[in-house]
Amino acid sequence: MMNKIAILLLIITALTSTLMANEPDSAYIFSYATTENSGRNGLHLAWSHDAVEWHNIGNRYSFVKSDYGNWGGQKRMVDPYMIRTDNGTWFCVWSVNESHNTFAWTKTENLMSWKPQDYPLLKTANCQRPVISFNNSDNTFTLTYISNEKYYSITTSDFKTFSETKEVQSSDYKTNTITKEMPEGNVSGQMFKVSWNEVDALIKFCGYKQYKNELANERTDKDGERFANLKPITATITAKPDMAKPISDMLIGIFFEDINYAADGGIYAELVQNRDFEYNVADTKGRNKEWNSLYAWNLAGEGATLGIDTTAPIHSNNKHYAVVNISNIGASIANSGFDGITIRNNEIYDVSLFVKQEEGKGGKIEIKLVTDDKTVLASKTITATSSKWEKKSVALTASADADNARLEITPKYIGKTTFDMVSLFPRNTFNGRKNGLRADLATTLADIKPRFIRFPGGCVAHGDGIENIYRWKNSIGPLEARVPMRNIWSYHQTLGLGFYEYFQFCEDIKAEPLPVIAAGVPCQNSAVGGAGQQGGIPIDEMDSYIQDILDLIEWANGDGKKTKWGKIRAESGHPEPFNLKYIGIGNEDLISDVFAERYSMICKAVKSKYPDIKIIGTVGPFFEGSDYETGWKLADELNLDMVDEHYYQTPGWYIYNQDFYDRYDRSKSKVYLGEYAAHLPRRPNNLETALAEALYLTSVERNGDVVAMSSYAPLLAKEKHTQWNPDLIYFNNKEVKPTVGYHVQKLYGNNSGNEYISSSIKLSDNNEKVTNRIARSFVRDSITGDIIIKLVNMLPVEVASKIELQNLVSDNTTATATIMTGNPADRNILPQTSDIKIDETFDYKMPAYSFSVIRISNTRP
Ligand code: AHR
């Protein structure tokens, strides 16, 4: 990877070429943080020529922000303390909050790029007002700090290993912290004398950042002013068939995560909510006190009780079950599903449940689908008499439509009966799979023609704290033996949609499976477990954790008869291997030492046992910064096949960063752009965001030799249960509502190629605000021989283009054009396709704010 800072400085210098005639040799800088925004604004710098009159650098730009703990609650920088060692490196430590037994440290050579950032654990209860000093003679740092009104110190040479903690006298606590009057008031921090060049570089760096920021914040709502004098644009676009290169044929995929009720209550077709009676208030982090074992269940009728027991469960992984004690026949329990149960006339619904007689002989139990007004939509009777757990199944055929039905269970006898794993599935699942997926949602995904599916997250993969890491083995086998768990997005995962079902769906839609496994660390924003990334899986448990990952590969690919895990897969119903080719290790992790140690162990073990499996590593949650840079460095060292980049940015960012991957070194790891989306204030998914994504994807196709895969995120969101916006597809129990962005993904997925054909463009207006808003890409699909041209116009005016195909057209060439166009704020634009007439050179008008896909068949090879 190129040295971005060096490039940045060159650009800064070029941008700010005015030379000062009379510059000082040196000046002062002052480093400080404020308590604004609960201390989350990070480290500011100010400069002064006389240490009296201070000037904020970059309008209080945050040179480094704390990345500790969870969003919303943590990420605080309290009392930062900065020093500079004799070799010029800057170090900064700070307290992360008032209660955790850790401190943060980071370093930089130039005050602009800080890395890594880490949080060593301390032996004391907390760490307040940390101060560091550096001893040149033995190259050690001494950290002195306060905890519960006592003073402590430790030494270290590398911030990895530390001396014993020593309690010291208050007189040993020596600090250079002073108070200075800034434009915003008095602040405390540290002052340093530096060369003027250093100050100058900081000022220019902030100027450059501000310039980039302004570009990134350009939105269509100001296009009226921005393009008030814009003349009609003409373009000549010329294909260069002699300059073609192979590109990835896997570019468009999907990323499925159980966020926004995407799985339970979403694509997983189970209609009973809390079928396992395992809901727990902890799933919602204590926020919803009603979220317990009886959530979504209720008891009706006189002379009956409904309770929960755990003494004799069907399986130890599934401890809770319902106990119904009936002394008056007629009482029933009912489940209201996820926002009601949607039933369709004449459809068959499969009910299954485990039942046991605790007291009494049992007898007949009526199973019904009923509406609010007590209309019975379907009814059947089972007989349950055993005092041991028995599985009973029955199929119900609905006699009418209903949107708000419930499943009612009515024992027709007096006695005490226990129930568990009460399930209701439509027979009509996607591809008719048992324990399958909602057909309408799964079809909508399949229609994208995704080349791969990444699952199960995202944050769900690495979890909120170590105990919440997703363990694939917990998600396979009989449903009653799976281990339900708290979902990091604050609800419940039954894991009914588990690895077997994910792999099967991939196979059904001919997409490569891409499972993501936590890199031995939980989410860097973990709210649970105290110190976020500090909570890596203990090293002495890593061997068994790694074995689980190797077992996954054997489970997916091993011989169904000869290997232990291959046999388990075969017994689940899939004798043939799934042919797994990719595995993701880590997700947006903080690239700390704790992470690096575990990640390296995993990657090396997988490479050594399964050299053909492509490992996709992680480089943090942003397109720049410490995790991105350190993550890439680590990927280089480990020689990883691919890394997973994530960035959610404004439409303006995508418009002005179309050269992002043109800058990448082709000899290094390939890129999986695993999560991206254009975000506007209030987070709509509208034509503006969709066009920004379409525009950026032309550059992804152009760089299809370095970007191997991409997936928009997040994918699914259930209305009224959405934790994150925008998403690609919204839905409720009855309807699927693909967004404008979905149609862009679908158009790319259905019109991909494996060869990129270069082209040139000549525009009548070369203002960068115009040129960056028009994009094109030519690809050839070698299977059909078709050539596909994608054209994006994000301007408020039409672009009249002349397209020169340069000998690609034959006598019987035909073409279609599919266009999405409208008002940038529109959320309901649908693509329109028509036949068009084309020739070697043809005219094509790109409407204002439009995405066009021209598909040309019967081309010349
Ligand atoms: O896509 C939603 C979330 O965004 C993912 O879980 C996580 O990886 C990212 O922060």
Image (spheres, rainbow, N blue to C red):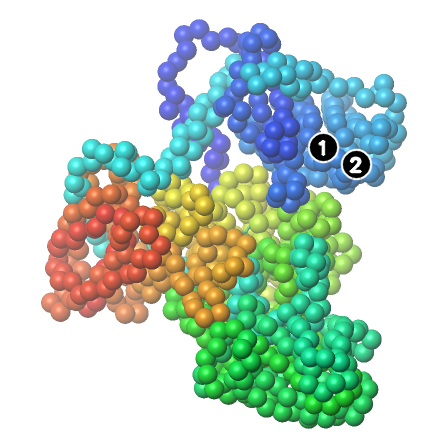
Q: Residues within 10 Å of mark 1 (few under 14, many from 20)?
A: many
Seen in the image, is 753 located left or right of residue 474?
Answer: left
Location of the C terminus by quadrant is bottom left
Q: Does residue 314 appear in this view?
A: no
How many numbered marks, from 0 up? 2
The answer to whether residue 332 is left or right of residue 801 is right
Residue 417 location (% of width, % of height)? 76, 84
Residue 794 at x, y = what percent? 28, 45
Which badge, 1 or 2, is on the more N-terminal residue? 1
Seen from the viewer's position, the closer of residues 514 and 737 is 737
Does the residue tagged 2 have its C-beta within 8 Å of any atom of ligand 1? no
Q: Residue at x 57, y 77 (%)?
A: 406
Instruction: Place residue 498 in its image quadrant.
Output: bottom right
Disc 1 to disc 2: CB gap under 8 Å: yes
Which amino acid is tagged 2? Asn
Q: Three-letter amino acid code at disc 1?
A: Ser
Residue in the foreground of this view, choosing between 704 and 522: 522
Q: Look at 51% across and 40% down and name the residue there.
A: 624
| Residue where numbered disc 2 is placed | 126
Q: Circle 2 — which element?
A: loop
Residue linked to disc 1: 95
Q: Where in the figure is residue 215, as x and y percent of width and height?
A: 38, 35
Which quadrant holds residue 207? top left
Residue that appears at 63% across and 36% down? 66
The residue at the far front in this view is 302
* Vertical order, 25 against 174 (above or below): above
- How packed mark 2 is, by other alpha carbons closer than 10 Å (few <14, some 14-19, many 20 or more), is many
Location of residue 363 with respect to 466 vertically, above or below: below
On screen, residue 63 versus residue 364, left or right, reads: left
